[in-house]
Amino acid sequence: LQVLNSRKASTNEQTIPGIQQIELSPSGPEVESEPKVACVVSRGSERKPAVHIARLSDPKNFVLSYSFPEGDDVTLYWNASGTKLLGLLSLDVDESGKSTYYGTNMLYLFDMVSNVVSRVACNSPIHDLGWCPGNARGDRMGKGEDPEEQFILISGRIPPETALLSTSSIKQADSDSSGPEDGSASLRTLKPVHSMGKAKRNTVCWNRYGRYAVVGGFGNMAGEMDFWDMA
């Protein structure tokens, strides 16, 4: 992993064996937190991927690391302020037999403020998710909620349920926080802000201001499109 500082013409370098992908957190004058990079690391045939997160200014020291008990792939989603990261863990084979032919997946929440990793309690499979954009302004569904802490999640068997969830408060927790690299994240239920119902939907799109959201069904779950005014 090489981080180039164009202003100082310098490069910070960190050797990370098995690195598969990286995801940069948002940055800019409206983002208060320091830019970070999240790396997905594969451990070969062990099927135990890991996520390492570091500040761009100091990539040699991880601020948060977590190793999944098992899994085949991880997709990362930063929120607009870089304070939260969602990791969608995919398993090609569901040994429990409770999911679909295509395997199963699980959702994990990385809280960069408290340095806690939690597994989000939700139905499987997860079809899509999308954070509210960071430049959302004004009152929205669920007054008093920070828009940057909200995301839309489509999950469950057909027809899946679509819901607007908030990470700013936890409805319940089966255990306390997890330690880094322990592979045993606590199970947490996020606060539901609004239920958008059950229908054949598998795609979430936001407009750049976070005022409108579109939820639609495409591909092997062809359905209709719902247009939501989130104000």
Image: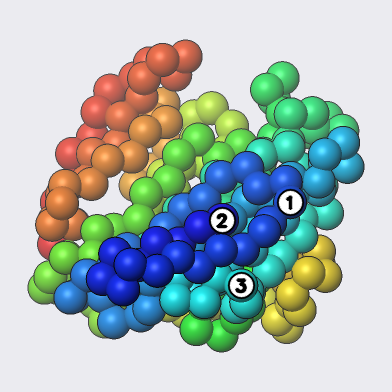
Q: Secondary structure at mark 2?
A: loop
Task: Determine the secondary structure under disc 1.
Answer: loop
159 left or right of 187 in image: left
The residue under the point 16% across, 65% down is 135
- Residue picked out by circle 3: 60
Seen in the picture, residue 32 relative to 51 is either above or below; the reply is below
Question: Which callout, 1 or 3, points at the residue further toward the start of the chain?
Answer: 1
Percent coordinates x, y for residue 53 in the rendering: 57, 67
Residue farthest front in this picture: 9
Task: Give the CA distance from mark 3 to mark 2.
Answer: 9 Å
* Coloring basis for residues: rainbow
Residue 121 visible within the image: no
Residue that carries the numbered disc 2 in the rendered image = 1
- The x and y percentages for residue 120 are 61, 60
Report whether residue 69 is seen: yes
How many numbered circles does the render carry?
A: 3
- Mark 2 and mark 1 lie on one chain; the one further toward the N terminus is 2
Residue sitting at 56 percent across and 56 percent down? 1
Give the label on residue 37, or none. Answer: none
Q: Is residue 224 left or right of residue 140?
A: right
The amino acid pointed to by label 3 is Lys
Binning the other alpha carbons within 10 Å of mark 3 as few (below 14), some (14 to 19) or many (20 upward) gives some
- Asked if 119 appears above or below 163 in the picture, the reply is below
Position in image of residue 193 (x %, y %)? 36, 65
The quarter in which the C terminus is drawn is: bottom left
Q: Residue at x 56, y 45 (%)?
A: 21
Residue underneath mark 1: 17
Measure how far apart labels 1 and 3 are at the Cα level: 13 Å
What's the amino acid at mark 1?
Answer: Pro
> In 3D space, how far apart are the residues under numbered discs 2 and 1 (Cα atoms)?
10 Å
